[in-house]
Image (cartoon, rainbow, N blue to C red):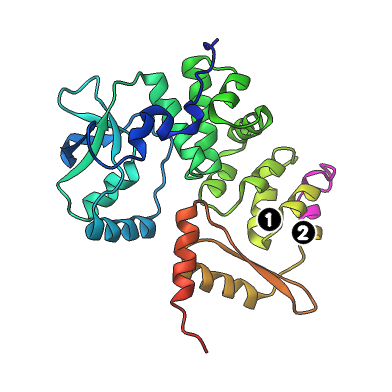
Amino acid sequence: MTSEPRRGLGRGLSALLGEEASAPPHGGVRTMAIEHLHPGRFQPRRHFDEAALDALAQSISAQGVLQPLLVRPDPSRAGEFEILAGERRWRAAQRARLHEVPVIVREVADRDALEFALVENVQREDLSALEEAEGYHRLIADFAYTQEALAQRVGKSRSHVANTLRLLTLPDEVKTLLDEGRLTAGHARALLTAPDAVALAREAVRYGMSVRQVENAAQSSPRAGAGAARAAAPQRDANVIALERDLAAILGMSVAIRATAAGRGEIAVLYRTLDQLEDVVARLKLVPQR
């Protein structure tokens, strides 16, 4: 069992650092050589968008690192420091060929390091659904959190935590599709009740099925199997599939085109982070106007 939740931690960086999070670099902020820093062991985020890192590196080249990184002394390596918040800035600073970055050093226990890294990423919507689920699982497994206490800490409902954790029970192939962004978290939750989650996941990707279509197919009887998915998603035009691939290559992320027989439809760009969304908008602004 965990102790009574500490007030304010769910507010993120400013709660842990007080006013120093938004204050200009002075006082507790100092510079540190990049080579003395390394990613924290409890960082739940595994994927960093390359285009977004390049854009941040350009900004850092022009203006420097405006917000200090939060670090703690590495308990196993003297003179080294673990990054608790700001790994993305650290990676971009290396691309910008900086030798030093501003940091705030704090003594933080392992449990708090994992909790803080998870809260910070969840608030910024930087995690994939699986990364979020794995972070929740680690807090529960390693530090004996209950789902209710964990929900309070991260500022989510207990049902959200429970449903997110259930994603870890999906077959590995389905989790790979989710991690790659080819399926959304909504698709994955719908697949939890499917008789054959792998087959239905393949159908969903192949035909660009909506979450509602996957939900309907998952609720069908086991005897219907993949046939129910095919009934929900008729054969698609080869030209539409080719356009999807072309758009995906241009934008650098998954694209789904859903067309109707009347010639209408919609284009869905599947992004995982706000950085990816901003990158899409920037790319579209560069398209010549006719």
Residue type at mark 2: give it: Arg
The residue shown at (33%, 34%) is 20
Q: Where is residue 159 drawn, in percent x and y?
A: 69, 30
| In-front residue for pair 221/264 | 264
Whole-angstrom CA distance, mark 2 to mark 1, is 7 Å
The answer to if 237 sits in the magenta stretch is no
Residue type at mark 1: give it: Glu
Q: Residue furthest bottom?
A: 290
| In-front residue for pair 243/156 | 156
Q: Where is residue 141 drawn, in percent x and y?
A: 51, 19
- Residue that label 1 marks: 203
Residue 15 tag number:
none
Q: Secondary structure at mark 1?
A: helix
Is there any visible trace of residue 188 in the rendered image?
yes
Region rendered in magenta: 218-229
* Residue 123 located left or right of residue 212: left
Q: Are marks 2 and 1 in contact (CB under 8 Å)?
A: yes
The crowding category of the residue bearing disc 2, from other C-alpha atoms within 10 Å (few below 14, some 14 to 19, many at least 20), is some
Q: Where is residue 124 drawn, in percent x and y?
A: 48, 43
Q: Where is residue 162 drawn, in percent x and y?
A: 65, 29
| In-front residue for pair 237/28 | 28
> Which of the 4 image quadrants contains residue 156?
top right
> Which of the 4 image quadrants contains residue 86?
top left
Q: Secondary structure at mark 2?
A: helix
- Residue that label 2 marks: 230
Tell which circle, 2 or 1, labels the residue nearer the N-terminal end.
1
The residue shown at (77%, 65%) is 234
| In-front residue for pair 226/131 | 131
* Residue 55 located left or right of residue 101: right
